[in-house]
Amino acid sequence: MSGSLFQRGFLSLIATQFFGAMNDNVLKGILTFMVIDGAWAGNLGSGGQGIVGICFTIPFILLSGYAGQLADRHSKKTVTTWVKILEIPIVMLAGLGFWLGNLWVTLAALVALTCQSSFFGPAKYGMIPELVDDSQLSKANGSINMMTNVAVIVGTLVAGVVSDLYAPQDGAAGMVWLPIITLFLISVGGLVSALFLTPLQPGDRNLKYNLNPLHTYIDAIGEMSKTRLLMVMMAWGYFYLLAGIALFIVPEYTVVLGINRAEASVLMGVLGVAIGIGCATAGFISGNQIQPKLIPIGAFGLILFFTLLAAVPPWMPDAGPMIRVALSNVSFFILGAGFFAGFYIIPLQALLQKMSPDDERGRFLGTANAVSFTFMTIAALFYWAIRPAFGDEPQNIFYVSAALMAAGAAFFLWRLRGTGLVLGNANESPSEKPAVETGNPYQPPSEPE
């Protein structure tokens, strides 16, 4: 980080996001392990982690429209502070569910936590252009995505350890109090970080709330369709279809490799590290500009490593419990996929922020958030539907992921042809230059849709 990134406001945002992402992944991770082979194994059927995934994504779809309106009307710092206050009683409810051994209470808490997180999304991404200069957007997005993935790593590793201590696989008595203490301490860290955010100006005080969430999405999509911004948003959201499927497969390596949950968490950690490094590298390469030409490079890398994950038989060296997983070929392939994922998402995310009009950025980003979680919901339903067909070899689902990435990349590259967005520099593209550099995102496309 350099320049305007190295200041209190942006660093506080990174810390706030870090604790929020960590808590989301701790709760979701423990629930997923409990549903696969823990205290609630079989309660949701084969591929039941897909149901957990749906509980995680649906609130984002339903509430991101309201969240975008809230972020456009009020100070994004105020919105952030309130959602962090609400996080504390929600995680206490989740901890109570674990204490009582009640799956349904814990699932309800997961839904509530994602409702809370859905209101943080537009405020979080919307405040980045308020905290840093336009020339720093790629670096800012690379930095915050890197730290988010560090949070995913830490949260996933913590989830694996807490799961083993909460419900040991050997049937011994577990520490039923551990989840509630863990979740509470993380939520307090998020609230303290939010209090250090620099004051931000309120948005449009005259904005009238529309209680129909679909109306916000329809209006935003209608405005986006006047430019290439709609295709940028869809390409960004499509990534989460692939990411969602991958996140359901990786915990099942407890079966594929015959390892415990903590060791499976190592693979999730590797994925998080890789995405973080990929995001940081993409931000570094972009410098003071947005470099959409990284998008096809990222897509190709994802296709290659998804295929390797399915085609190459899993192998581990003869080493210690955690080290053998970290040095496995599965870990290497996941590292490659995650690294190239960063190349794919960072330019798209920066374009979304820069091309969105200042007075509607919250609603545009809220709509983009809803689209990404719609794709994740589709991933959960898709995984739940196809999982039984793959029996004891869930890793072969990565063939499907590779095919979906290839089809999606071909479609979006074709739709963005002639714009310079995927071949040149967004700041230099002739067809998009007025929209990106002057802040006018309503320039008509250079060719008919």
Image (cartoon, rainbow, N blue to C red):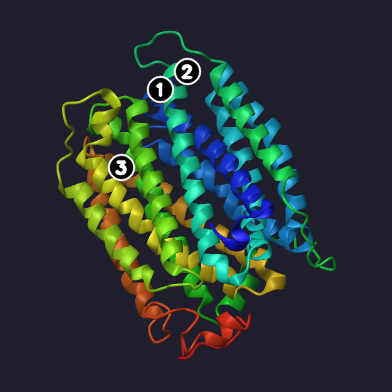
Q: Which residue is pictured at 53% across the width and 33% down the height?
A: 27
Q: Can residue 43 be seen here?
A: no
Residue bearing the label numbered 2: 166
How many labels were placed on the picture? 3
Residues under numbered marks 2 and 1 in contact, where contact means CB atoms less than 8 Å apart: yes
x and y percent of residue 208 in the render?
A: 81, 66
**Left or right of 52, for residue 123:** right
x and y percent of residue 143 in the render?
A: 51, 55
Residue type at mark 3? Arg
x and y percent of residue 314 in the render?
A: 18, 38
Residue type at mark 1? Gly
Residue bearing the label numbered 3: 387
Query: Looking at the image, which is closer to me, 9 or 183?
Result: 9
388 above or below 200?
A: above
**Left or right of 196, for residue 148:** left
Dot in front, 3 or 2: 2
292 above or below 213?
A: below
How far apart, in angstroms, are the residues tagged by discs 2 and 1? Answer: 9 Å
Q: Which residue is pictured at 62% across the width and 84% down the height?
A: 438
Q: Which residue is pictured at 72% across the width and 45% down the height?
A: 196
**Left or right of 138, for residue 128:** right
**Other residues around mark 3 within 10 Å, as few (<14) / some (14–19) / many (≥20):** some
x and y percent of residue 230 in the render?
A: 52, 74
In the rendered structure, which disc, 2 or 1, sits on the residue that comes first in sequence? Answer: 1
How far apart, in angstroms, are the residues tagged by discs 3 and 2? Answer: 27 Å
Residue type at mark 2? Tyr
Query: Looking at the image, which is closer to me, 252 or 72?
Result: 72
In the rendered structure, which disc, 3 or 2, sits on the residue that comes first in sequence? Answer: 2
**Other residues around mark 2 within 10 Å, as few (<14) / some (14–19) / many (≥20):** many
Residue bearing the label numbered 1: 38
